[in-house]
Image: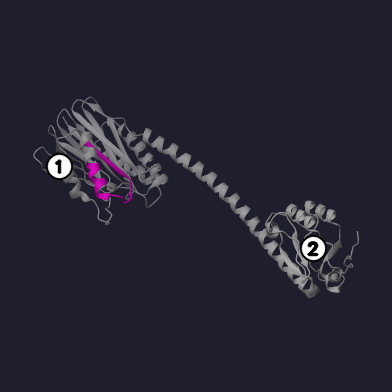
Amino acid sequence: MKVRATRPAEVASDTPVSPPRPRTVAVGVVSTLLDGPGVAAALELSSVSLAEAQDALRSGACDAILLDGDLPAEDLNGFLERAGETLRPGRPVVLVVVNEARRTGVSAEFIDHVDDFVNAMRGEEALLARLRNALRARATVHELQRKNEELQAVNARALAMARRMSEELRLAAQLQRSLMPPHVVHARLDLAREFLPMREIGGDYFDVIPLGPERIAIALGDVMGKGVSAALLAGTLKAGLRSQIQSAGTTPCETVARLNRLFWEVTPKGLFASLFFGIVDLEHGVLEYVNAGHDYPFVVRTDGRVEDLDAGGTVLGLLETATYQRARVPLAREDVLVMYTDGVTDRTSAGDEAFGLDRLKAAALRSRRDSARISLYSILGEVQGWAGSAAAQDDMTLVVARTT
């Protein structure tokens, strides 16, 4: 094997170090192109046999391979077939040096395996320029491939994280729904409810707590925000209310005042929740309630009158020492209590118009003689029909309770 290359002389440590010369092997290339001083200075060049070039190709022992276009077509195409396409990772640059007056033996099917064709008649400067361009292009391709691999790895990690988060949210949604109170079965009260979170989990809160054979506590709340943070605060609200109800002898307004103080202490400043808390006394036909800043529930009377339940005070968590007033309203047989969160009335149509409280009351009036479950889904059907294809912007909870 004839080597036309010299190692760079050792230089003093303070002398700038030139970039390494590309390791280049040449197979049968026109000798006049390889003997010039420019080639020797620019390349770490070796003249090798075709078999040795194939070994260098497999081992990656060179940066570039120069092939004589006058090699037998069988040898030339066999080598290019082994080399593979130019974008194959780790493959050296392959240039075919041709004589302007002769036709190369490269078959059409292997044209894409050649990085460039160089006209031997144009001299060493043309050869070096084309080789530098091919090496720069290859370096760019390799860098893009490396970046692409990094992006694919990042994307794979992001997808794995998204799958974990999706599974955790699915489990959280199951947990949140499992914490919803069971359906109430009572001879004097027909109650139905539906919770429709905008995301997997939401910040609406609903609870039903039996206080005796004929007394039932009902609570409906809406925590500021959406998603996981709102769901956590809704859980805090539920646990706090249940703990306060256990205190014997407390009135609804005292219960809500204590809950407000607790919520104010444990939640980040600036966050709050609305709450409607009522106790239905079925024996005496009375609803005693406190409305802490919640959208007004209403009672639909048998004669078609609608009465808002608006007595109470401000939202929970806004003022540490907030006080609340309670109110009492009669509940006659077949009266209908409708409780909701603002996701119901704020549901917009395709024209961005809200469903609104008036439409909600009208829908409740039309279905007041139906069972609680039929009435609830009739109302929700009207809400969905109003919204059409427009997406929900908030959690929705609707409760219908009918005395029997």
Of residues 85 and 166, the one nearer the viewer is 85
SS for callout 2: strand
Residue in the picture at 82% in, 67% down = 43
Q: Is residue 352 above or below residue 287?
A: below
Task: Name the front one of labels 2 and 1.
Answer: 2
Numbered label attached to residue 310: none
Residue 219 forms part of the magenta stretch: no
Q: Label 1, secondary structure: give it.
A: helix
Which residues, given as a range, are shown in magenta? 379-400
Residue located beneath label 2 in the image: 66
Disc 1 marks a residue whose amino acid type is Leu
| Contact between labelled residues 1 and 2, with CB atoms less than 8 Å apart | no
Q: Does 357 sit above or below residue 328?
A: below
Q: Looking at the image, is mark 2 or mark 1 earlier in the sequence? A: 2
Local crowd size for mark 2, using a 10 Å CA cut-off: few (<14), some (14–19), many (≥20): many
Tell me: residue 331, above or below residue 316: above
Q: Which residue is mark 1?
A: 365
Q: Position of residue 127 (x, y in %)?
A: 77, 70
Is residue 159 among what the camera can see?
A: yes
- Figure quadrant of residue 353: bottom left
In this rendering, is residue 27 above or below 198? below
Name the image quarter holding the C terminus: top left
Indicate left or right for 360 with 169 as reference: left
Q: Name the residue nearer the viewer: 398 or 17.
A: 17
Task: Name the residue at 16% across, 39% down.
Answer: 367
Q: Is residue 155 left or right of residue 19?
A: left
